[in-house]
Image (cartoon, rainbow, N blue to C red):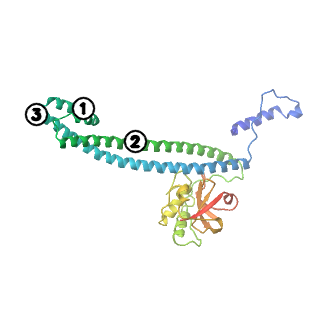
Amino acid sequence: MASNGGRRTARRIATGFGVVAAGGLILPSGVAYADPEPTQEDVEAKLDELNQEASSIVDEYNEAQEDYKAAKKKADELEEEVGDEQEKYDSLRDEVADFASAAYKSNDLDATTTVLSVEEPEDLLDQSADISYLSEAQKTKLDEFGDSSERLFKLKDEADDALEDAEEKKDEAKEKKDDVEEKIEEQEALLAEFPDADPATEGDSSGGSYSGSASGDARAALDFAYAQLGKPYVFGAAGPDSYDCSGLTMRAWGAAGVSLPRTTYGQAEVGSRVSYDALQPGDIVFFFGDLGHAGLYVGNGQMIHAPRSGKNVEVVSMSGYWSGQFQFGVRP
């Protein structure tokens, strides 16, 4: 899409040449005008398209973040296990050294040299059968020495591989997220040029109060969600100062004592599904074919949600656009 400056320049050039039909001026071959300026409807349609794409990407990003956290936790646990293995490894190495010392004192120098010159426990195991001076108990210790070494390096490899893979996916998801955010910002800037457009708003954490008919856990969830009114949408955020769509629904139901998964995909699998006509206040409502967006139904055909980048947590009607994108509701 041409920039504003490019379009203004194109207009000035066109004005300078005058109207072709009136002046009879023929432009040289190969000269082309800039693309027609987009209408407000064009920009809004593109923004809707990008935000639908962003809804999918933010869940991919959140899922990658959760996978990374899980991999990091597992890596930390494995690191502790590796530490335990290292202690056992060191202890067994000391015992092997004692075997070698005993062999030296008994003048079995060939056997001693064999033990001391081996750097890898696996190599020592290969040769241990030929070390005739060792007792069965000592040979068992050598076997344990090799097994401990094998476990140690296997655990380290597992931890490193899992964490590296998760970090790679997290970085890829972040790159996609940054790219779509940049495109959304460009469209927001174009939209702001139209005088009657709905502009992106600054964060206002004034909050609000739910006054509907919900009770019990549903009311607790809606009370929490309404208290977040005005807080900005931020990719990957789950409070307390900003939220994305699934971050808001997760925290809202968390305030009611109900634990939900982090992503919309995960939340869609919790509880019982309900149709549009059967929705009750507190139900989680899902949108788009890939379930990329979610909010909380508040009653009277409205929902509270964290809409998209550049917007704040708000209560909106589900008629029109949102009813066309509605997939189903879930009652946790």
The residue lying at 54 percent from left, 73 percent from top is: 215
Is residue 160 something one can see in this rendering? yes
Q: Is residue 225 left or right of residue 134?
A: right
Q: Quadrant of the N terminus?
A: top right
State the separation of the CA atoms marked 2 and 3. 44 Å
Q: Residues within 10 Å of mark 3 (few under 14, many from 20)?
A: few
Dot in front, 1 or 3: 3
Mark 3 lies on residue: 106
Q: Which one is closest to the eye, mark 2 or mark 1? A: 1
Measuring from the top left, give residue 276's x and y in whole percent. Answer: 65, 65
Residue at the farthest left position? 106
Residue 219 percent coordinates (x, y): 54, 69
At label 3, which amino acid type do we have? Ser
Residue that label 1 marks: 118
Q: Hey, what amino acid is under mark 2?
A: Asp
Q: Which residue is mark 2?
A: 160
Q: CA distance from mark 2 to mark 1?
A: 27 Å
Q: Is residue 309 visible?
A: no
Q: Is residue 95 above or below residue 331?
A: above
Label 3 sits on a secondary structure element that is loop
